[in-house]
Image (cartoon, rainbow, N blue to C red):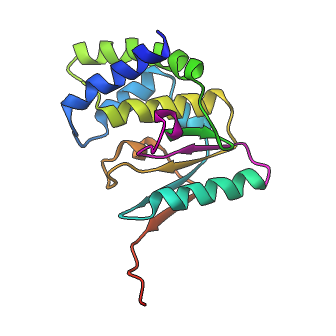
Amino acid sequence: MNYTEAREYIAATERFGIKPGLERIDKMMAYLGNPQDKLQFVHIAGTNGKGSTSTMVGSILTNQGYRTGLFTSPYIMDFRERFMIDGIMISELEFAEIMTKIVPVSEMLEKSGYRLTQFELITAVALLWFAEQECDVVVLECGLGGRLDSTNIIKDPLCSVITRWITPIF
């Protein structure tokens, strides 16, 4: 699988929409060896400010010498912005290699009635890549948030952050 094919596979899942629940991501990660269990996390949720907070925390950790993974959503210019280590995006080759491992599991799960959503797939990409790259800590931004957000596959984060919107007073 090359980068274009990997992106097309992810894009094709968008039509299946959002399906809250952890069962699908739990099954996916179990088949991949539960790479998330090898990592430490700062888990960031909230209505507004998640991306800025995640980026700042990631930068602080990187500047302190930690090998820091950063998973954010959405992206601004390049799809690969969602997956960074020490401020550097996943390469197209690395993304294609990770997807080559994930797609067969996704297709097997789909045959069993477990069709993964787009966000579940990209969460799996991030967690597998960060584990393979032996990150010291991962800053993990929630998707829609809530108890059933696929990022809640992680156990016992080092820190959980809930951001909130503050209306500026001028």
Magenta: main secondary structure equals: loop
Magenta stretch? 64-81
Can I make out residue 158 in this image? no
> Looking at the image, which residue is at 46% across and 19% down?
99
In the image, residue 152 above or below residue 146: above
Q: Is residue 71 magenta?
A: yes
Please provide percent x and percent y for residue 167.
Answer: 38, 81
Please provide percent x and percent y for residue 89.
Answer: 60, 35
> Looking at the image, which residue is at 46% across and 9% down?
1
136 sits left or right of 98 in the view: right
Q: Is residue 138 magenta?
A: no
Q: Where is the C terminus found, in terms of image quarters?
A: bottom left
22 sits left or right of 134 in the view: left
> Looking at the image, which residue is at 37% across and 48% down?
143
Please provide percent x and percent y for residue 154.
Answer: 48, 44
110 sits left or right of 37 in the view: left
Can I make out residue 164 in this image? yes
Q: Residue furthest bottom?
A: 170
In the image, residue 157 above or below residue 39: below
Toward which corner of the image does residue 38 lie, by quadrant? Answer: top right
Q: In terms of depth relative to the viewer, which is nearer, 6 or 101?
A: 6
Toward which corner of the image does residue 138 lie, by quadrant? Answer: top right
